[in-house]
């Protein structure tokens, strides 16, 4: 009798029974419920295929550079860039031990993302305030994320061309522009990079799921992602989706077995969920001042906005037109839009669940999109925007994946599928290459950004305010006035618009009107630190020094790191003769912004009045380094070098050089500069020049009604006539 043949041993995908099943390193072991075949060409191996993968990576990088490379020539924009970068002294100082401490202990614009803040510090260390360097970092981070997405998808699914198309669409879709071309959205591209690294590490871990070292490789980038932007709190949820498809770590069999498998996978991710929960609480606390209360936006309105926003993001993905930096809130949404959006969400969700057994990518892609948007969909509203392009950065990857895999599977039996699918993919990328650069160009500067936003939206007070402020910064006061007034017509209780209009009116010399708008801003928002500071400045200029001191102090109670308020308060206290308090304020201003020349000058003035000449010289010299052309610092430094009470501090030759330069630059007719020059000549032994200069200064002082200065010059003139210099405290 013939002997029966031994059956060949076949590989099987293990169904979960309480513990996660290891995933084989080869792509052939992907679960049948989740796999879809295009042919052997989609499973590259060998040297030639590695070159193909490398070539695709280069192509993806070229796509990103084609669309976003131009941003290295763009400026900062007046949309949070000042808060996060160029007017934030803690950031502009570069990386330091104190800077690291500050990043982890402070929020910026009600956001706590210390790693993102550190990245801005590093950019300032490398590029200073050259905006092009900051843009370059964003482009490089996005490029890295795009390439990693391609490699991770290919590693998980074994599908080369599908993975490449998903990554390419993610790379250059116009909805990506806000995240990449806006320096302040560094948090998107940085957290996106750690998101991709976490996915890569998780695929590595899933092949040997009980390895502590591999698990830590998952936890580490996830933690860094959370420190970059809290929106990645949904990543553990995404990993659960990937367990089903494409990793095939469990299948739907019986309800009991499925629940047991889900419980095991969930327990595996408890540390990740714990980190996500902690960051959620921290973020909720940090955004306390930026959250919109239920009285302003009730639950029913939030839920309607949630449904409409989900639909809006899908529409913008398919037809990315009229994309704007800020979409104003909508007070009422037509009921048909709410019903239509809700019906669409429910229908697609039901269909995705029904299709999950055969085509797991449909459910995974759809839930990826829905789930990742939850933190920013508006259930907890932070800010007044109705939605934002940047929120789609990572969530829409799920939709790209769903549509790409579905198109490939639907055409799997078609004879000409490769030509057809290749043609469609080419058309899609060509359309994106055409649209995305036009959207990118809107972010060249503040004026172009807000002009485009106004063209895409209506009744947009934020855009009117932004354009008005951008024009104000360019010195185009008349145009700025029109837009700021329009912002207040749309929203009369817009505190920032009142503040900006107050600044504009002050520059135009209309101080009474400026004060009205600063006061209005404070009535709307009593905790508006900058408005308190500017109102204090207006009072100071009107001679109401005590009232100014109160406003400066209130500004500092709200924002203790407001360097301008510390400086202004120091000036007011100095004028009142409260020298010790003034010195403290100037010192605190310099701790926040060490490179402020005016703070060094006025601290030097206060120290000089206290008789601390040596310390005053240090600050005058630092001020001179920061602003070599400052007449005030040249004059003050010359004075102390000529008249210091300690002989070791005096330097007549240098005093003369500084005083002559200041006097010449001032026109030679200013009695204050001539006063200093006379003292310098005397210290240098040039008493005839000292006498002649002091006489001229005394005549000018008397003509100008400066009797105190004239009296001092008369006393000093007697010393110079007697061949004696004037020294503080000894004459």
Image (spheres, helix red, strand yellow):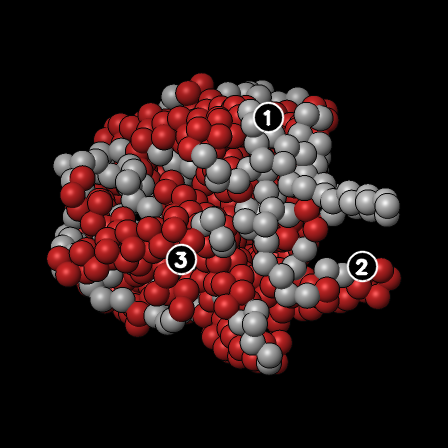
Which image quarter: residue 560?
A: top left
- Mark 1 residue element: loop
> Could you tell me if residue 96 is visible in this image?
no
Q: Nearer the viewer, residue 665 or 184?
A: 184
Q: Position of residue 713 (x, y in %)?
A: 48, 37
Q: Secondary structure at mark 3?
A: helix
Tell me which numbered mark, 1 or 3, is placed earlier along the sequence. 1
Q: Identify the residue under disc 2.
A: 45
**On screen, 540 above or below 128?**
above
Q: Earlier in the sequence, mark 2 or mark 3?
A: 2
The residue tagged 1 is 19
Q: Quadrant of the C terminus?
A: top right
Task: Please tell me which residue is depicted at 56% across the width and 72% down the height of the picture.
Answer: 413
Of marks 1 and 3, the one in the foreground: 1
Vertical order, 585 against 626 (above or below):
above
Structural distance between the alpha carbons of marks 2 and 1: 32 Å
Query: Where is mark 3, residue-wise?
Result: 389
Label 1 neighbourhood size at 10 Å, few (<14), some (14-19), many (20+)? some
The image quarter containing residue 73 is bottom right
Q: Which is nearer the N-term, disc 2 or disc 1?
A: 1
How many marks the image carries: the answer is 3
Local packing at callout 2 (Cα closer than 10 Å; few below 14, some 14-19, many 20+) is few
């Amino acid at each position: 009798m013939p002997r029966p043949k031994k059956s060949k041993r076949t590989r099987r995908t293990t169904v979960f029974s309480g513990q996660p099943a290891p995933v084989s390193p080869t792509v052939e072991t992907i679960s049948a419920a989740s796999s879809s075949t295009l042919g052997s060409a989609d499973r590259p191996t060998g040297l030639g295929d590695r070159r193909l993968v490398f070539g695709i990576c280069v192509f993806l990088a070229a796509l990103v550079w084609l669309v976003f490379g131009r941003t290295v020539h763009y400026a900062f924009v007046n949309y949070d860039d000042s808060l996060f970068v160029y007017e934030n002294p803690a950031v502009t100082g570069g990386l330091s031990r104190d800077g690291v401490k500050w990043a982890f202990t402070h929020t910026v614009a009600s956001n706590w993302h210390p790693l993102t803040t550190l990245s801005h510090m590093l950019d300032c260390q490398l590029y200073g305030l050259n905006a092009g360097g900051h843009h370059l970092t964003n482009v490089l981070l996005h490029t890295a994320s795009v390439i990693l997405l391609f490699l991770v998808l290919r590693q998980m699914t074994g599908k080369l061309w599908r993975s490449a198309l998903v990554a390419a669409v993610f790379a250059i879709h116009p909805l990506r522009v806000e995240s990449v071309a806006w320096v302040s959205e560094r948090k998107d591209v940085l957290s996106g990079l750690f998101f991709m690294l976490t996915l890569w590490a998780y695929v590595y871990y899933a092949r040997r799921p009980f390895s502590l070292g591999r698990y830590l490789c998952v936890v580490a980038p996830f933690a860094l992602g959370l420190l970059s932007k809290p929106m990645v709190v949904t990543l553990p949820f995404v990993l659960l989706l990937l367990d089903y498809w494409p990793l095939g770590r469990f299948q739907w069999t019986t309800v009991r077995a499925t629940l047991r498998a889900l419980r095991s996978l969930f327990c595996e991710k408890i540390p990740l969920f714990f980190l996500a929960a902690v960051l959620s609480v921290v973020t909720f606390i940090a955004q306390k001042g930026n959250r919109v209360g239920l009285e302003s936006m009730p639950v029913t309105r939030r839920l309607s906005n949630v449904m409409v926003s989900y639909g809006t993001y899908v529409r913008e993905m398919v037809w990315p037109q009229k994309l704007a930096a800020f979409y104003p809130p909508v007070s009422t949404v037509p009921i048909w839009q709410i019903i239509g959006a809700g019906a669409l969400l429910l229908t697609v969700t039901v269909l995705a669940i029904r299709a999950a057994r055969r085509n797991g990518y449909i459910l995974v892609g759809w839930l990826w999109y829905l789930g990742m948007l939850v933190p920013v969909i508006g259930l907890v509203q932070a800010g007044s925007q109705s939605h934002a392009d940047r929120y789609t950065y990572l969530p829409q990857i799920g939709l790209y994946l769903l549509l790409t895999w579905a198109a490939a599977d639907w055409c799997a039996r078609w004879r000409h599928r490769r030509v057809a699918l290749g043609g469609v993919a080419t058309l899609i990328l060509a359309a994106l290459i055409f649209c995305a650069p036009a959207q990118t160009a809107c972010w060249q500067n503040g004026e172009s950004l807000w002009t485009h936003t106004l063209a895409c939206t209506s009744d947009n007070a934020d855009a009117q305010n932004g354009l008005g402020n951008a024009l104000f910064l360019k010195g185009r006061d008349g145009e700025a006035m029109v837009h700021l007034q329009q912002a207040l017509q749309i929203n009369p209780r817009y505190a920032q618009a009142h503040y900006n209009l107050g600044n504009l009116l002050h520059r135009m010399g209309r101080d009474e009107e400026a004060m009205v708008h600063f006061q209005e801003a404070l009535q709307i928002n009593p905790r508006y630190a900058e408005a308190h500071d500017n109102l204090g400045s207006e009072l100071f200029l009107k001679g109401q020094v005590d009232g100014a001191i109160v406003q400066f102090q209130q500004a500092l109670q709200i924002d203790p790191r407001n360097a301008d308020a510390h400086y202004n308060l120091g000036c007011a206290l100095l004028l009142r003769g409260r020298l010790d308090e003034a010195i403290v304020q100037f010192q605190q201003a310099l701790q926040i912004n060490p490179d402020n020349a005016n703070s060094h000058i006025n601290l030097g003035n206060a120290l000089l009045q206290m008789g601390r000449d040596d310390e005053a010289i240090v600050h005058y010299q630092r001020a001179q380094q920061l602003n070599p052309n400052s007449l005030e610092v040249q004059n003050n430094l010359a004075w102390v070098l000529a008249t210091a009470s300690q002989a070791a501090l005096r330097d007549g030759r240098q005093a003369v050089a500084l005083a002559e330069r200041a006097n010449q630059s001032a026109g030679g007719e200013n009695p204050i500069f001539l006063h200093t020059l006379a003292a310098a000549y005397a210290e240098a032994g040039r008493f005839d020049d000292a006498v002649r200069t002091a006489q001229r200064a005394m005549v000018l002082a008397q003509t100008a009604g400066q009797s105190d200065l004239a009296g001092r010059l008369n006393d000093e003139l007697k010393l110079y006539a007697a061949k004696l210099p004037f020294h503080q405290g000894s004459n």
